[in-house]
Image: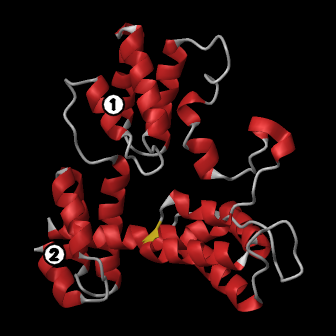
Amino acid sequence: MKLVGFLGWISAVTLAVACGSSGADGDDGSSSGDPGGGANPQEIADCKSSCDQLKFFDCNDAQDQATCYDHCAEASSAQIELFVACVSNDTCDPECSTHIQPEPDPSSGPTGSPTGDSSSNSSNSSNSTCASDGCNTDTACSEACESLQFFSCIDAATFDDCAALCLTASDDDKSTFASCVSSGGVIQCDAVGCYYTFNPDAVPGPTPQQIEDCKMSCEQLGFFDCLTGAEAAQCAAGCDEATQQVIEGFLICTADPTDCASAVECFE
């Protein structure tokens, strides 16, 4: 259980860094259009440092890092402050990047959200095409399943079960499920509970992302020499078998990966 806590800390640090990639307006004090005003060079540098952390922890790829840099150059001081703080507390949280993301152009309508805005695009991904007239409950249900899988809230086998259930469940159940996912916080997998309500026969377990975070924490324990290579491998293997409760506890327990004394206790 303690093993899980360490992983959570690493994921948080990673996401927080990566989230600094979406900036808004204001590379300098002369920038207009951003109510918070422009950021100074040091703030922009801090923002880009968070982008680097996201890349280092594999929260972002090379293209994401470049986009993150662009957003930092345009973001306001207030936006950068929120972004850097978010990354420092939860590195790979996709919502961190929304703090530095440019405001959408009101004249562009529903499609005006900037490319790379994971929060505005993905949080509504389950009903993005179903917002218009003529979308049936089957489509809305399928999109909800796709959203959960896209954000690593359910694995491939669970997705197949979800998609199959969308073909056999009642329209009311499918509509309720789609609405639940759309408003339930799919980015951080808060909406995964919607699936287990939709399919009461399914057994709740850790999300694929939680398992991945658990393994990353094990790697970090090895990186900081808190565990030997063999112990880190054993730790990672245990993530595949651990319950959600154990993983969550492990991530909390290992909040400080540099504190090897506490980290080893979490591993044990």
Mark 2 packing: few (<14 Cα in 10 Å), some, or many (20+)? many
Residue type beneath disc 1? Tyr
Residue tagged by mark 2?
266
Residue type beneath disc 2? Cys
Q: Which mark is residue 207?
A: none
Q: Residue at x 33, y 31 (%)?
A: 195
Point out residue 58 in the picture as x, y percentages from the top left corner: 52, 66
Q: Residue at x 60, y 78 (%)?
A: 81
- In this rendered view, identify the residue nearer to me: 109 or 187: 109
Q: Is residue 199 above or below residue 27?
A: above
Q: Residue at x 48, y 61 (%)?
A: 93
Q: Is residue 32 above or below residue 174?
A: below
Nearest to N terminus: mark 2 or mark 1: 1
Res 37 visible: yes
Res 57 visible: no
- In this rendered view, identify the residue nearer to me: 24 or 242: 24
Count of numbered circles in the view: 2
Q: Secondary structure at mark 2?
A: helix
| In front: label 2 or label 1 | 1
Q: For the view shown, which residue lies furthest in the front direction?
A: 35
Label 2, label 1: how far apart the Cα atoms are: 31 Å
Q: Is residue 138 above or below residue 161?
A: above
Point out residue 184 in the picture as x, y percentages from the top left corner: 42, 40
Q: Secondary structure at mark 1?
A: helix
Residue tagged by mark 1?
195
- In this rendered view, identify the residue nearer to me: 67 or 169: 169
Figure quadrant of the N terminus = bottom left
Point out residue 213 in the picture as x, y percentages from the top left corner: 35, 62
Figure quadrant of the C terminus = bottom left
- In this rendered view, identify the residue nearer to me: 264 or 122: 122
Contact (CB < 8 A) between labels 2 and 1? no
Residue 209 lies left or right of residue 136; in this view the side is: left
